């Protein structure tokens, strides 16, 4: 029997399991998936929790519900991967030997990396919204808040879902307006980037949005510490921004088991070939999703497009055939812009988000890089697609590679 | 684009980053630093030398966190040496390409 081990049963690991079980002969393959957390979180839904649009039960389901028959699921902490011995050591000493390993161990926020973030303000007037606990605590805070200075701060890049902090700002503007206290709230968006977003054309559109919504943009601010006693964030070069409510997007890191295994870079992300998804250091290890060090967005859509390429390359690898160098960094993200509207962006390693129509050129129905109601409804409907199709490995009518059809080049 | 500096002509992109590192030398680095208002000291050179070594090994300019964790340069010190955007400035002075923007 050949052994395949998948580490991590989040979006990427679960999709891969569902794609691989039907194509690998059960008489030849033993497949095991490992995760320490029995609950599956629909992470894109966390954004909506602070504003009462989703409740915690909308974004959590048991992981087991999404595992196909024919694979063993192990819930437990990964002590270490020993790639030179082709085995994984689990909590309690259980050893999983493998012929092939797929790393889908994801990324997490690491507030402990910033001095003062976990100090006296944490979950009192300093919150994250990248965990269910953080998003729920923030919902409770906002319920009673009467206004003041809201600062949204990205500590450092890269982060999961790089548009989410902007969406939070847009939704906050809408939510305070709806509650009739927008005039009592100052919103400031503080980023280490030189613009509102990483990609220039989208940065211009999104920067204009911030301005229209009266959200102050502060760029080139690299957060060094949080002075919770005085309610201010302090940059490495000693600039300061004061807040009454800080919504922090902390440093993101790969899983600690990657560090314990000595397999990651300085943020525990695993060096990965950007077009094949094979590990750069081990010829029988593939890496997918947020766990990689690829210069692509850390987002479920990227993992989804990677999964198609990884399935193909896994089948090639086990047959001893050359890998396809096909992954192009494709990402596709809805951006909530508040007031029941949204934007959509579609891009890859080489082509930044551009305006146009999607998925059908000229017709849409969704608009790229432009506000519309249908984009907002599509985003809300996507939760159903995620639980019912995407995680289960179903084919979606989207090609893994990005297409220029329907996009307009702009100066 | 061509640029005259330290008595020689170098090729740079529109933002001033060298496009051919074989043209780079220490005199050029000192002159580029001076244009940014920086006088290079041994501490600056320690940073530039780590970037050079890391760039040769990995093909990319290391970020602030890597300079700290692997290069042993405290982030605060890095900002003192190269104010406002230390990696961008160090890369420009050291003759490296502009650091890839994050995604």
Image: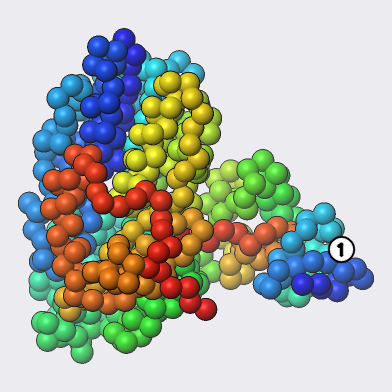
Q: Position of residue A344 (x, y in %)?
A: 30, 67
Q: Do we see residue B1 in this rendering? A: yes
| Quadrant, the N terminus of chain B | bottom right
Above or below, A84 against A36 in this view is above
Identify the residue shown where x is 38% and y is 34%. Answer: A312
| Quadrant, the C terminus of chain B | bottom left
Mark 1, chain letter? B
Q: Position of residue A82 (x, y in %)?
A: 43, 21
Above or below, A125 against A289 in this view is below
User: Viewer-proximal residue, A369 or A5?
Assistant: A369
Query: Tag 1, which secondary structure?
Result: helix
Asked where in the image residue A381 lies, by quadrant, the reply is: bottom left
User: Viewer-proximal residue, A256 or B103?
Assistant: B103
From the viewer's perspective, tell me whether residue A411 is left or right of residue A122: right
Identify the residue shown where x is 61% and y is 46%. Answer: B72
From the viewer's perspective, tell me whether residue A315 is left or right of residue A390: right
User: Viewer-proximal residue, A207 or A19?
Assistant: A19
Q: Do we see residue A252 in this rendering? A: no
Where is mark 1, residue-wise? Answer: B27
Q: Residues within 10 Å of mark 1 (few under 14, many from 20)?
A: few
Q: Position of residue A387 (x, y in %)?
A: 15, 47
């Amino acid at each position: 029997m050949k052994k395949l081990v998948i580490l991590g049963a989040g979006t990427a690991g679960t999709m891969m399991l569902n794609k691989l079980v039907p194509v690998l002969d059960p008489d030849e393959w033993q497949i095991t998936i490992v995760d320490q957390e029995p609950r599956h979180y629909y992470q894109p839904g966390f954004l909506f929790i602070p504003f009462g649009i989703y409740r915690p039960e909308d974004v959590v389901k048991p992981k087991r519900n999404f595992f196909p028959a024919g694979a063993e699921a192990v819930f437990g902490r990964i002590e270490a991967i020993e790639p030179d011995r082709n085995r994984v050591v689990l909590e309690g000493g259980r050893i999983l030997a493998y012929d092939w390993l797929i790393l889908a161990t994801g990324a997490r926020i690491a507030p402990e990396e910033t001095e003062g973030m976990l100090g006296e303000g944490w979950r009192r007037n300093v919150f994250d919204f990248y965990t269910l606990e953080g998003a729920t605590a923030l919902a409770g805070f906002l319920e009673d808040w009467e206004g003041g200075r809201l600062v949204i701060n990205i500590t450092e890049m890269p982060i999961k879902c790089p548009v989410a902090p902007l969406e939070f700002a847009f939704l906050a503007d809408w939510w305070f307006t709806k509650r009739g206290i927008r005039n009592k709230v100052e919103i400031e968006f503080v980023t280490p980037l030189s613009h509102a977003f990483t990609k220039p054309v989208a940065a211009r559109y999104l920067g204009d949005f911030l301005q229209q919504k009266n959200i102050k943009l502060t760029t080139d601010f690299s957060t060094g510490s949080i002075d919770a006693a005085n309610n201010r964030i302090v940059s490495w070069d000693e600039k300061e921004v004061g807040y009454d409510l800080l919504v922090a997007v902390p440093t993101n890191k790969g899983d600690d088991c990657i560090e314990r295994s000595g397999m990651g870079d300085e943020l525990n992300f695993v060096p990965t070939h950007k077009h094949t998804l094979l590990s750069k250091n081990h010829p029988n290890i593939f890496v997918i999703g947020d766990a990689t060090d690829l210069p692509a967005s850390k987002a479920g859509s990227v993992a989804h497009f990677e999964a198609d390429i990884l399935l193909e390359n896994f089948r090639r690898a086990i047959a001893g055939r050359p890998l396809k160098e096909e992954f192009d960094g494709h990402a596709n993200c809805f951006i909530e812009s508040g007031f029941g509207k949204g934007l959509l962006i579609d891009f890859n390693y080489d082509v930044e988000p551009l305006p146009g129509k999607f998925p059908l050129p000229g017709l849409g129905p969704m608009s790229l890089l432009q506000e519309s109601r249908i984009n907002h409804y599509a985003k809300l409907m996507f939760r159903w697609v995620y639980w019912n199709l995407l995680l289960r490995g179903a084919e979606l009518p989207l090609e893994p590679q990005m297409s220029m059809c329907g996009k307009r080049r702009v100066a | 684009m061509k640029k005259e500096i330290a008595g020689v002509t170098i090729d740079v992109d529109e933002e001033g980053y060298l496009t051919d590192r074989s043209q780079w030398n220490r005199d050029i680095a000192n002159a580029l630093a001076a244009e940014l208002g920086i006088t290079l000291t041994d501490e600056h050179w320690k940073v530039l030398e780590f970037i050079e070594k890391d760039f040769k090994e990995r093909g990319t300019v290391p970020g602030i966190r890597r300079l700290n964790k692997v290069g042993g340069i405290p982030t605060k010190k890095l900002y003192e040496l190269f104010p406002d955007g230390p990696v961008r400035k160090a890369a420009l002075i050291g003759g490296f390409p502009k650091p890839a923007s994050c995604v």
